[in-house]
Amino acid sequence: MEAMSTSVPIGTALTAGTAGTAGTAGTAGTAGAVGYAAVAAQILVVVAGAPLLTGWMRQVRARLEGRAGAGVLQPWRDTRKLLRKESITPVGTGPAFRAAPALLVATTVVAAALVPLLSTDTPVSSHADLIVVVALIALGTFALALAGLDTGTAFGGMGASREMTIAALVEPTILLSVFALSIPAGTTNIPAIVSGAAHEPARLASPAGLLAAAALAVAVIAETGRIPVDNPSTHLELTMIHEAMTLEYAGPDLALVELGAQMRLTLLLGLLSSLFAPWAIATSGSWAALAIALVAFAAKVCVLAAVLAAAEVLWAKVRLFRVPELLAGSFLLALLAVAASYFLNGAGS
Amino acid sequence: MSAIPVALATATGLGGAGALAALVVPHRARVPLVGALTAGVGAAGAAVGVTALTGTHWSAEFPNVLPLGGTYLAVDALAGWFMTIAGAVVTAVAVYGVGYAAGRPARRPAPECRAPGPGVPGPGVRGLGSRGAQAVLPLFALSLLLVPVAASVSTFLALWEAMALGSLLLVLADHRERPAVRRAGVWYAVMTHLGLVLLLTGFALFAADAGGETFAALRAGAHTLSPGVRGLVFVLVALAFTSKAGAVPLHTWLPRAYPEAPDPVSALMSATMVNLGVYGLVRTGFDLLGGGTAWWWLGVLALGGLSAVYGVLQAAMASDLKRLVAYSSSENMGLVLIGVGASGLFAAHGDRPQAALALAAALLHVVNHSAFKALLFCAAGSVVRATGLRDLDRLGGLRARMPWTAGLFALGALGAVALPPGNGFVSEWLLLQSLIHGLRVPGVAVAVVLPLSVALVALSAGIAAAAFVKALGVGFFARPRDERAAAAREAPPLMLVGAGLLAVGVVALAVAPGLFADGLGRAVSAATGPTGGGAPRGGGELGVRLADVSARMSPLWVVAALTAATLLAAGLPRLLARRRRRRVHARLWDCGGGAPTPRMAYTATSFAEPLQRVFDDVLAPEQDVDITPVRESAYLVDRVRFQRSVPDRIEHRLYEPVLRGLDRAGRAARRLANGSVHLYLGYGFAGLVVLLLALTTGW
Amino acid sequence: MGLLRKIRATGRVAEPAPPRPEGGVLEKARELGGSAQVRCVDAGSCNGCEIEIAAAFNPLHDAERYGARIVASPRHADVALVTGPVTRNMAEPLRRTVAAMAEPRLVVAVGDCAIDCGEFAGGHGVEGAVADVVPVDLTVPGCPPEPEAIVAALRRVTGR
């Protein structure tokens, strides 16, 4: 481990970092205008890029199925149309139903600002904790599940119940992967993990890195509700998980819900690519590096999405009660990753 | 003269006055007066705690107050931490309790009140408002505050027992109305006294070997104890304290006593009394016994992990609102015990800064849990009072009828699920950090235990989210499933004010936990001693040097960013739309059939079903399908009866065999006592011979 | 890996897009801007039209490439594809389905039965044609209509 000794009083561990507490390499916030631009670009690329990414995945699927496809812009057209339609408040729903779509998008936006998709040197990078990001994403799930129950319909409750069951089982896998990744870096700060891995690529090729990547990939698929855990394009209510909670939304509310789901997919794929392929992410405050990072991010996420789309063509959705087995498998991978990370790192010396 | 003795004397005086007032003041004025005096007790206790947290120490001895040992009192930062929590909760709950016990509930008698399911409490002149209960309430509040002040074994045990008896009497307040209360009372009485016996044995052993019963003497003599005796003392004491904290396997009193106790009492017990179990463990394990060996703390960690997951699983299965909240106490105390155990483990391996971090996480979770749990129980109490229902399968739609209560419950639930703007997240984050960074501590046991602990914390957080989505979504959202829920009215103002005070605490803890950091640092160092690693103590802040650790999280920024982003996300689409369309109301989508009735909505039981299937092997639900065919043909079904329950499996497997064994032993022993005087004389003679033989062989 | 080989061997099966249908985009659908979510309602058809609708969305005709997509909830939908003569039991559900859709919404009557009850006109359980129950914006004649006709109707909604 790096022989770096920093002083973190408990007080400052809780509050915002006060002056005088040094961070590890890559976390010190020296960013100026470029740093702010990087944060804005990260948010923008996730918000604007998410429908494009979904369009890209649908296009890949369409081509593999021998179809022509609607083009990558189609999800944006859908969103535009939904924004023009009227909102419907079903009788008997309350504030939870109304607030959930905005909250879903908001959690993802905040998480997108924190995760170093483009740059590890941003004004918020010292607060970019991996556990916080995971919890923010879980908060979105929580809000949507409450909205599903708020409608009081059978399908809303069914979707909420299934979604929370899966979310509960995904959580240990994600946090153990976080644990495994934080051992070599000595911190759960994502920019520090990413810049550490970028400087030391051997970490990624280690058994721990590969196992953690596999575990996290399964968790991402489960969190975003893709095949084999959930089928986002199903029309049959009884097989739904995520869609069942959103059956009552219409118009702009639905646009937010769909945008939120697409943004989560983009963000989580981006997080995967940042953690396990941290190349070309800007580590300093230069405009050129940011531009390169933007292009590299688009390329990495598109490749990942294409792989996921191709896998969705080849796989079938598994039964709901087989999903825990899948998640238990990924949990085991994460546990192995921690063990490998610990023992291969020289037993904590 | 320092402020501490004055405030302590004030608290004691107010407590006594409260008890006296309850006995002499007539019914009409009794509840408000006692409530005000109890709130005063809480405020005075909180004042003592806050003073102690600023670094003031105080101790005193009154050799003549208690027979045998005399009374020894001392207040340090660790005691101050728990007194502050208890004082604050007591004050808020006392205000809530005035609204609760005064007057009758706004509930019209429902014809099917006698339907099976959780019973109906009867606040008012009986129950918590009665003369006896009101007399006990201030004394119980006082004992909650004084337990951490005790500085000798006899003083501690006396106050501990006073607390146990006080809570027992309050749990039984409603025993006339509901027989279930009596059963819960018996369980609680037996369990708490089992704990007392363990404590008494442990401390007696400790004091005998250490050569004194004051805490100072124990501290000084702890190192003269043989490792075996120290281990035995710790095991005995830890079992008793974890039982008080509601940890598995000695938790069975908790899911029985909390739902049956009057709601303010549930809030007090779950938010303050369980903490004292943690206090006792930390005080004895760290302070008095001075650390100890790794296996002690591995045991505590295992208990904590088990409690966290088992408690939250039971909470997720529960369809009784108060039972759900009660089991969540088991979970949160499990998390605290994970922190305490990890801290002891690190200390045993000599990494004091790491130990301090883990203990800080545990203590912070104690206060967070107290805040949201008291709030949850108060809100649940308002629901029970307004509807007479605890069964989530019958509740629903309360958000429209009791908006304030629903909002307060939602705030508490947000804390309980450990998600960002909630206060529980802050301490769970710190706990996870301390566990993740604990891998720096050498040792294979550490390397095996920590990842599992992280996984257990994560799993419990995930299931807690499911449990509270269920409680909030099924209990408060959607539409009422029972006419009593449909007729609910908002709780009276004083109850809302009391719960609102707790809500203020929850928000403060969630947004600005840094405010508590100074006191937390002092409390931790009071427990573990000055932390090693050259941590300078100056400027009122505890410094912990942790190599390679740099994790930061700012709850205030997260809240601000989330709020801004939510407003933006809600507002932008409206601005972007060229032609604004009005929001219209429409009936629920019913698949074209008739309007969906509340009977079609998901209930708590159906919500929990997938989780229950996943954890089938752990929960072992019992189900029974009974099909009655019509007489003419076996293929035509007349009636199907389906029954399923998720029993507490630990109780099933651990307690029932023991109880059966005891019962059998009792029956067998009856044969030994057949009433013959000759036989009894024979027993006496045999006993004497055995004793003499034992003495002659020099045993 | 047999499936991968099959995918490579099959290649693209979608037929080249025919020219835009006559009549241009419907005035009411202009606001949709190239996107139409479709909810199918079988109001009492013989299922012949359903088979043709399914065919319209298969890889060969690929109605999805014009921006149409079948969804599960009428709340998500812009277009209701209604088939069959409306039976007595389906009249109210059909009204409710259309009412559940957010404005702007369109109703497309698919098949002769939906237009004028076709073979089933005057039948015992028949309430009437779709237009008798809900306002219809577009009709697709045929018994059953060919997939190309259904795709053409959907293209007049999406305008692509």
Image: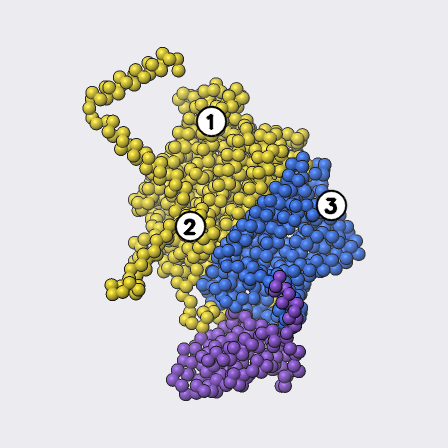
Measure the C-alpha gap from mark 1 to mark 3: 49 Å
Q: Horizontal placement of A45 versus B491: left or right?
A: right
Measure the C-alpha gap from mark 3 to mark 2: 49 Å
Residue type, numbered disc 3: Glu
Q: Chain of mark 1?
A: B
- Residue at image location 45% in from the left, 25% down from the top: B203
Q: Horizontal placement of B582 versus B204: left or right?
A: right
- Residue at image location 69% in from the left, 60% down from the top: A303
Q: Chain of mark 3?
A: A
Q: Position of residue B2 (x, y in %)?
A: 54, 29
Q: Position of residue B377 (x, y in %)?
A: 44, 47
- Residue at image location 68% in from the left, 43% down from the top: A185
The image quarter in which residue C10 lies: bottom right
Chain A colour?
blue
Residue type, numbered disc 1: Leu
Would you name the residue on which mark 3 appears?
A200
Q: Chain of mark 2?
A: B
